Image (tube, coloured by chain):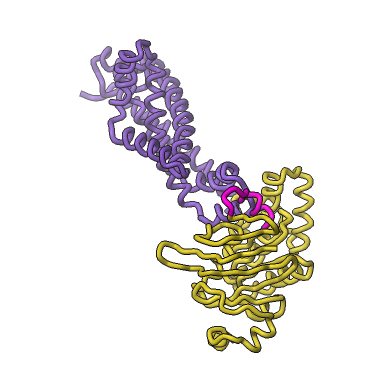
Chain colours: A purple, B yellow
């Protein structure tokens, strides 16, 4: 039997509405994960051993366990302990933000370490404080180096967000799956969902290149 | 006045500086020379505490800066430093490189800082490069910007760590000329250099270091024409 995308036509809007859901989760998780990742990376390179230890342990745990497990612990497990219900959307972006922060912190740490040591010395010799040096001298240079790796992380986040299906969030993936169940043909809606994810990733890739070009203006 | 007393510095088991005692007076121009690995740069970097001395004390004017209670940042504000590899901030324009520290550290307004930058860029002959990024400059131009950046903090003394060693030969003179006019203006300068002609012409005093020790200290004429120690004689015979 052949594929019948025309029969899927009435369901396109339903699946497409999932884009907004997916984007919301990814955007909130990316921003929170990035900010938290910056904090973790600063803890890792700072001089306080205790903070370094915490940040390393955090990264180790969140990189060492499956994302879907973290998601389920937050959504199904935590309410049992906290005694409050957590909305699927909140559980989704929390899990992704916490997980992404672990990866982002490693990317940023490597980026900071790759900045020439002389930059730090020049800043110190001018009497610039540690905080200002990080904010205005070191991090901007680190960001330029790590942008491709960071973009990669956002792309991964976009694709991996499909696992929120498992806690019932109505994202692109879940909608495609539901349509498949209703029409008894899974192939077309799933292919369509794949096409949407691919387009999202392409848009991200182009955005990344544009930002990279802007940052390269000082070269 | 910058005074070092019984300065020692070790990296692990490796003793790089051993019992160095020096006094640099205000307005004095001192060059530090010696074979590579003799500890010249480490000595210089100890003076503004980019390296923490293992033992010994450093005074800037009447303040003992090696005292843990002293404010290192305040010390560094008043001592400018120029590096072998310039270390300009690559993501900032020439003007921003110069104005950043006066604004952030000294709280100068943007207008004031820009005024300082304009004056210094004129002084080092690079007024037309104010809005360029460092990557567009030659080595000699970068080093002159680095000198202007350090001067923008209105330091009482300037440290130069082999400022011409990374330059193509034809660019050495433009940097040395800037330094010469700075010396003529009465700035206290401590210069680690391999430029013997310059050391001889500009310095009030020469410090000769070898294997981490201050082996000889003399006026340039005495040092270059009549070195007392065998090691200085040997060094000079190899390079002159």
Q: Is residue B195 magenta?
A: no
Q: In x, y percent, where is residue B213?
A: 53, 74
Q: Residue furthest left?
A: A1
State the image coordinates of residue B34 (x, y, percent, origin top left): 56, 77
Q: In this view, does A70 lie to the left or right of A38?
A: left
Q: Quadrant of the C terminus of chain B?
A: bottom right
Determine which quarter of the picture holds residue A25: top left
| Residue drawn at point x = 46 percent, y = 27 percent | A27
Q: Say whether residue B70 is magenta.
A: yes
Residue drawn at x 53%, y 84% is B231
- Residue A78 seen from this side: yes
Residue located at (57% from left, 50% from top): B68
Q: What stretch is highlighted in magenta?
A: B67-79
Q: Is residue B90 visible?
A: no
| Left or right: residue A132 compared with residue A167 | right
Q: Which of B64 and A2 is in front in this view?
A: B64
Q: Quadrant of residue A188?
A: top left
């Amino acid at each position: 039997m052949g594929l019948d995308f025309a029969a899927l036509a009435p369901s396109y809007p339903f699946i497409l509405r999932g884009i907004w859901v997916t984007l919301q989760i990814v955007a909130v998780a990316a921003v929170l994960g990035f900010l938290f990742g910056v904090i973790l990376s600063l803890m890792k390179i700072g001089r306080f051993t205790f903070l370094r230890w915490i940040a390393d342990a955090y990264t180790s745990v969140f990189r060492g366990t499956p994302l879907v497990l973290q998601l389920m612990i937050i959504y199904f497990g935590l309410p049992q302990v906290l005694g409050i219900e957590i909305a699927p959307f909140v559980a989704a972006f929390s899990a992704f933000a916490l997980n992404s922060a672990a990866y982002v912190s490693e990317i940023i740490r490597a980026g900071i370490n790759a900045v020439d040591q002389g930059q730090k010395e020049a800043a110190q010799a001018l009497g610039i404080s540690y905080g200002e040096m990080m904010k205005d001298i070191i991090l901007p240079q680190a960001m330029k180096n790590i942008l491709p790796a960071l973009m990669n992380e956002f792309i991964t986040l976009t694709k991996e967000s499909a696992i929120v299906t498992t806690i019932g969030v109505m994202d692109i993936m879940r909608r495609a799956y539901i349509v498949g169940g209703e029409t008894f043909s899974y192939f077309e809606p799933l292919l369509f969902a794949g096409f949407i994810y691919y387009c999202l990733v392409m848009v991200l890739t182009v955005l990344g290149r544009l930002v990279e070009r802007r940052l390269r203006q000082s070269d | 006045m910058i005074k070092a007393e019984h300065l020692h510095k070790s990296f692990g088991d490796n003793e790089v500086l051993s019992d160095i005692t020096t006094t640099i007076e205000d307005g004095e121009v001192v060059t530090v020379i010696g074979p590579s690995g003799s500890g010249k740069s480490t000595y210089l970097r100890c003076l503004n505490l980019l390296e923490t001395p293992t033992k010994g004390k450093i005074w800037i004017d009447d303040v003992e800066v090696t005292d843990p209670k002293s404010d290192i940042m305040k010390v560094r504000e008043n001592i400018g430093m120029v590096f072998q590899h310039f270390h300009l901030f690559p993501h900032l324009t020439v003007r921003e490189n110069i104005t950043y520290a006066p604004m952030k550290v000294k709280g100068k307004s943007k207008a004031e800082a820009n005024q300082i930058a304009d004056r210094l860029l004129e002084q080092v002959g690079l007024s037309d490069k104010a809005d360029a990024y460092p990557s567009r400059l030659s080595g000699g131009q970068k080093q002159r910007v680095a000198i202007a950046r350090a001067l923008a903090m209105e330091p009482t003394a300037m440290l130069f760590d082999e400022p011409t060693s990374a330059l193509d030969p034809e660019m050495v003179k433009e940097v040395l000329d800037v330094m010469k006019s700075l010396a003529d203006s009465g700035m206290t300068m401590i210069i680690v250099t391999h430029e013997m002609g310059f050391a001889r012409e500009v310095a009030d005093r020469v410090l000769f270091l070898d294997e981490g020790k201050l082996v000889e200290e003399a006026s340039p004429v005495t040092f270059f024409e009549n070195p007392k120690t065998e090691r200085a004689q040997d060094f000079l015979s190899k390079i002159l």
